[in-house]
Image (cartoon, helix red, strand yellow):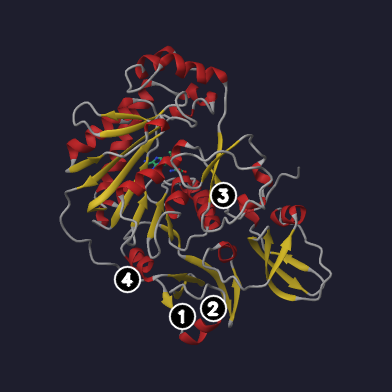
Amino acid sequence: MLTATMLEDWRHAPGFDEAAFSEVHESGAQVVSIRMNPAKWKDSSGLSFPLGEKVPWNSYGFYLEQRPFFTFEPWLHAGVFYVQEASSMFLETAIRQTVDLSVPVMALDGCAAPGGKSTLIQSLLPPKSVLVSNEVIRNRATILEENLIKWGSPNSIVTSSDPREFAPLGPVFDLLVVDAPCSGSGLFRRDPDAAEGWSRDLVKLCSQRQQRILADYWQALKPGGILIYSTCSYSVEEDEAIADWIMESWDAVSLPLDIPEHWNIVTSQSSRFHAWGYRFYPDRLMGEGLFLAAFRKEDGEGKPPRPGKPKWEPIPARKQQGLKRWIADDWQTNFVTLNQSVIAWHSELEEMLMRLGNVYVRQAGLLMGKLAGEELIPETALALNQQRATSLPQLSFDWEQALRYLRKEEIPWSGSEKGWYLATFAGQSLGWLKLLGNRTNNYYPKEWRILKSS
Ligand SMILES: C[S@@+](CC[C@H](N)C(=O)[O-])C[C@H]1O[C@@H](n2cnc3c(N)ncnc32)[C@H](O)[C@@H]1O
């Protein structure tokens, strides 16, 4: 699977040990890891597998001894954990060491689908922050949106535009994460077939695309803001050479990270500007290939352009009273209607939306549902959100019932209760169920339902 051309190219990469690297690729060894959602996870009662060792560079990451059949884990669907490659979780260390997390952060994840980095960022951001997760490819934005709804943070905006739409926004973000599309060599151990598509031309093409993406997003970063750039490629052209290109193109300061030696991460410096970079090799640590580098923006005077006009309408105070019972008492929120839906969001999120210009917004804030007269028909996003009221009626399901629910099958019911109930499994909400006396309506979204029967 590894070709002579690849090895020839990577031989000069910092920390590359050809013999050990080739051996670990031939061994077929696989590492499985998940990251827990600190906003939902209290204990492990809803997992069918034990959590193994901690991922050293992440507060909520764990290795698993074996790969469970994740589709049949109700907590995956409830957003209690996310299946993520361990090296990628290093983003937490990079953010904690470079970004001031004691004040609200306006963040942009520029290459966001399927949402691994975005959900990680959401777990770190303080209240009143906003994370804009952009994915240019529309059908990949669908899964991004689903994963963020399940993660349940109310600070989320999901957009789907070309990075060039962000350039005119001016300096609006404190943190920019660019986990760039790349030649993908860092994942060849996990997916050997992917190696067939690799070529020097691909590396070159990716490196040009990475520069284009960075050039557009850089303009939307505030002076003093932080850029975290990462790839899953071993090629210097996509890693240290891009760090050099950033240093050459703009007034950027390369930020070193403080890394314990026993993590076995290779610290590299780019050849021209000595920019710091961090390389992960699967023969040195428990994880796949990754490169990450952090920068602070020093240039970019000026203010962001004036915010646009809102496209939403505030909800009259009379109707707001009825909506408040669905959300946590201590969440300071505004209720608005947009495209006939009720949405709850905090003022910082509303301000960010007004600054997004021509960027195409797919989802913003907490989508609560639709009003039928005075009554709210709730959305699944409300059932899964961290700011949902805890006092709402719920039905607690066992494993089998939870899977029935997630397959959108009918749930047998003999009680006489009526109304909206949360379907829960091991204390975690999966979605809504409407009780209608002697039967139920399963409101789980059709597009999300589990299709596999066993
Ligand atoms: C490495 S993946 C991101 C993975 C994601 N950050 C995560 O952790 O789940 C790179 C993403 O960049 C997107 N992409 C591809 N071409 C792009 C472009 N020209 N501009 C911005 N993003 C692009 C891809 O669709 C892909 O979703």
Q: Nearer the viewer, mark 4 or mark 1?
A: 1
Residue name at image x 56 percent, y 78 percent: 325
Task: State which tag comes first along the sequence, 4 or 1.
Answer: 4
Q: Is residue 25 above or below residue 246?
A: above
In the displayed structure image, the side of residue 344 where residue 211 appears, left or right:
left
Where in the image, quadrant-wise, is ligand 1 located?
A: top left
Look at the numbered disc 4 and give the secondary structure of its residue.
loop
Q: Which mark is residue 71?
A: none
Q: Label 2, label 1: how many angstroms apart (C-alpha)?
A: 10 Å
According to the picture, the residue beneath numbered tag 2 turns out to be: 323
Task: State which tag comes first along the sequence, 1 or 3.
Answer: 3
Q: Give how far across and how far down residue 89 sits, in percent.
A: 45, 42
Q: Label 1, label 3: how many angstroms apart (C-alpha)?
A: 34 Å
Q: Label 2, label 3: how many angstroms apart (C-alpha)?
A: 29 Å
Task: State which tag comes first along the sequence, 2 or 3.
Answer: 3
Q: Residues within 10 Å of mark 1 (few under 14, many from 20)?
A: some
Task: State which tag comes first along the sequence, 3 or 4.
Answer: 3
According to the picture, the residue beneath numbered tag 4 turns out to be: 309
In the displayed structure image, the side of residue 369 where residue 290 appears, left or right:
left
Residue name at image x 37 percent, y 35 percent: 260
According to the picture, the residue beneath numbered tag 3 turns out to be: 81
Look at the numbered disc 2 and give the secondary structure of its residue.
helix
| Farthest residue, direction right | 414
Q: Which residue is nearer to you in this view: 129 or 259?
A: 259
